[in-house]
Amino acid sequence: MSNKLTEYRNKCLTQLEKHVEVERMYFKDVLRNQELCMQLQSQNWYQSWKIGWLEDKIKALELEGYAAGGSVKVILNGEGEMIKLFISPETLKESKEIIEDLIIAAHNDAKQKIKLKTSEELSKITGGVTLPPGFKFPF
């Protein structure tokens, strides 16, 4: 009887050891997965921070656009809002339509410079990865 009891005890211990090993491996995987999740969250936070920083940097930009050799100058902020307009006295002698066209041209020049500067700054962060067509950042 004691021989059968010893065999049964050994069999139970073997199964228990296998179960403990399986549990140990499972928790090892769980901890590894938690560590990977924490690393991903940290990377996501850093990327979000960099994008927020870039948005603030772009909003603070002031770029100038010119028309007619500088006789009309428009200054836009990074969001594309016009913050200053300069029209030379000689240009004011022109017709209303010409002045309007020159203002539009200078505005478009400044807007193009903002887009170029934005894409340059964004490519520094993304490592040159291009954005999908139609993506507008920040305006």
Image (spheres, helix red, strand yellow):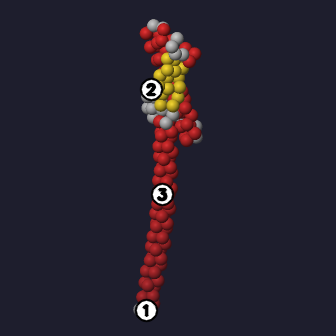
Checking the image for residue 82, the label placed there is 2
Mark 1 and mark 3: Cα distance apart in space: 53 Å
Report the front residue among 27 and 63: 63
Answer with mark 1 or mark 3, whichever residue precedes in sequence.
1
The residue at which mark 1 appears reads as 2
Q: Is residue 130 above or below residue 31?
A: above
Circle 1 packing at 10 Å, graded few (<14), some (14-19), many (20+), is few
Write the residue at 45% across / 90% down: 3
Q: Which is closer to the viewer, label 1 or label 2?
A: 2
**N-terminal-most mark, 2 or 3:** 3
Front disc: 2 or 3: 2
Instruction: Tell which of 47 and 130 is nearer to you.
Output: 47
| Residue 38 tag number | 3
Position of the N terminus by quadrant: bottom left
Element assignment for label 3:
helix
Amino acid, disc 2: Met
Mark 1 residue element: helix
Which amino acid is tagged 1?
A: Ser
